[in-house]
Every structure is written in structure tokens, then in C-alpha cells.
Amino acid sequence: MNFEHVSVLLGETIENLDIKPNGIYVDGTLGGGGHSSKICESLGRDGLLIGVDQDQDALDAAKRRLEKYENQKIFVHSNFSNIKNVLTELNIDAIDGVVLDLGVSSYQLDEGSRGFSYMQDAPLDMRMDRTKNFTASDVINGYSEEELTRIIKMYGEERWAKRIAQFIVQERNEKSIDTTGELVEIIKSAIPAAARRDGPHPAKRTFQAIRIEVNNELGIIEQTIRDVSEKLNPGGRISIITFHSLEDRIVKNTFKDLSTACKCPPELPICMCGGKAVLKRITRKPIIPSDKEIEMNPRSRSAKLRVAEKV
């Protein structure tokens, strides 16, 4: 299967990145190279794109897609949380911009064997980096009922989290749960029929929660933003696309914290900490897809873009 992914908020992301032709830019979630191809179009021969992705299929596809551009390119198999270390290993002290698209690629969703989709039966995997050993099966068959309830409620914002966790534990006491199809049927059994009639697919929130847990998606966002902020040149920008409220809240609050100079308690009459803002928020409110984009790509409907600039 070809690695295909429709890049969300593509024009808005590139426009807000404010690309310098001779700059150094990092696409920390390279995917199929959609955002990177637009970055490369704006770079001259001396410009450098560093493409990072934890999915080797994505790296291979992006290399093919981007080979026609004349600017310099470096591809790295790693998680975007390692951007600071990646740059150190490349002897690069500072960069001019970073793009992070935190969504799951269409390829990963549609490739049944990856186990991300609740629409196709496949082994319980959900690893974005298949060199890692920890899978969705480890979560479903190994976590306690309390742990399952916590992640399904917190990461999936699922009102039936406790009941779903109970049904999972009951089923695995009889036999291990090995496939996405088996898990979907358990979730359907756990959610009352009346609650299944409206809204998204009954397994959507639980699958989201498990995927987030397997890949530690939320745990790496804040520190990555802080690491990237250290590496940005003055005027350099970081553009982040999120797809659900948990991600967006972390990005919003971290941007806000890094753009606040004084960290003194509000009751102090004057600043005593001498703090300085690291970032300036370019987008006070997130940029969202147009109606036309949502019509063309329904998966973009929940996307939000936030941008900040190094002071």
C-alpha cells in the first residue's frame, strides 16, 4: 500500500512558518512529505529540510516524494520528542522553523495490518514506531481494570470507560483479546444500544485512548515545545497541528507559559523574578480548516493550528 496522507491546513501552516530561502527547517512528523514538499518549494539550494518520523514507511515515501527538490535534505528515523538530540548529533545549533502535525496519517489508519482502525480487523498493534515492543495488545491484555478505565476516560473522554474496562477484563479472563475486531465487539457490548445510536463509531474514543497510551502521544508534547524553543533562531517559528482537545490544551498552555515573561505570584506589586518571554504567540486563537477543506477531507474537521515565534 502506498503511503498517502492528505496534509491538513497545508497552506495556512506554510504561510505562518514564514520560510526563509536559506533557512533550516524541521518537519518533526514527516509523514508522506506533504508539509515538507511545500517547505522545499520555498527553499533555495542552500536551504535545509530535516525530516523526522518514527515510521520507517513514512520516511521511505517522503524520500521518494522530495527527491525532485534541489535544496539540502536530511532524513532521520526518530520520534519528534528527540528533535533536540537529533540536532545536536547533526551539529546544528539553531533552526528557523518546525512543523509538528500530531495526527495519525491516513496511511496508518487505512493500512489494516497496523491495527489503528476500528473499521478493519487486524492484530492489536497501534505502534507508530514498529521497532518498539509495546503494543495495544499489552495495554488491553495487561493493564488492570482501574488502569484501563483511567486511560479510556482521560485520553478517550469516553463516558462508558468503566463499563468498557469491565467488559475487557471479563473477556480476557476467558481468553486473550488479540484483534481489533474482537475489541470492537467488546466495546459494542459494553455500550448500551441507545447510546450507540447517535454520535461517532462506538469504538472511536477507546481506540484513540489506546493509541495515545501506546505511543505516549500526550506525554511528549510539552517538553518537545520547550526543547524546540531553545533551538529556534530569533524570529523562528513553531507550527503545531492538533486533532483533539487534549493535545490542543497542552500546546495552548505551553505557548502561553513560554510567552509570559513574569512568573511572580500575582499579589506581588512588581516583578521580582526578572523573567523573559521565550516565545510570542502568533495565533491567539487556533486556525481551523475552511468548510471547503472539511468537505474535501472530512478527517480535517477537528484540526487546529497554533503558531508561535521565538523572541
Image (spheres, rainbow, N blue to C red):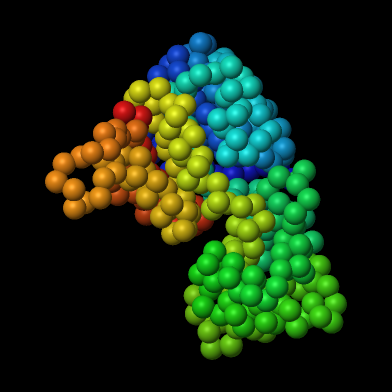
Q: Is residue 4 above or below residue 71?
A: below
Note whether 230 is above or below 286 in the view shown.
above
Residue 94, how many percent across, how many down?
47, 21
Q: Is residue 51 visible?
A: no
Residue 228 to residue 149: above or below: above
Residue 275 drawn at (x, y percent): 29, 35
Residue at the limit of the structure toward the left, as seen here: 269
Q: Residue at x 45, y 38 (%)?
A: 226
Residue 178 falls in which quadrant of the image? bottom right
**Residue 238 in sight here:** yes
Quadrant that contains the C terminus: top left
Residue 77, image quadrant: top right
**Residue 227 % position (x, y):** 49, 34
**Residue depicted at x 37% and y 50%:** 253
Residue found at x 51% / y 56%: 299
**Looking at the rendering, which quadrant does residue 180 occupy?**
bottom right
Tell which of 184 and 119 is nearer to you: 184
Residue lying furthest right? 175
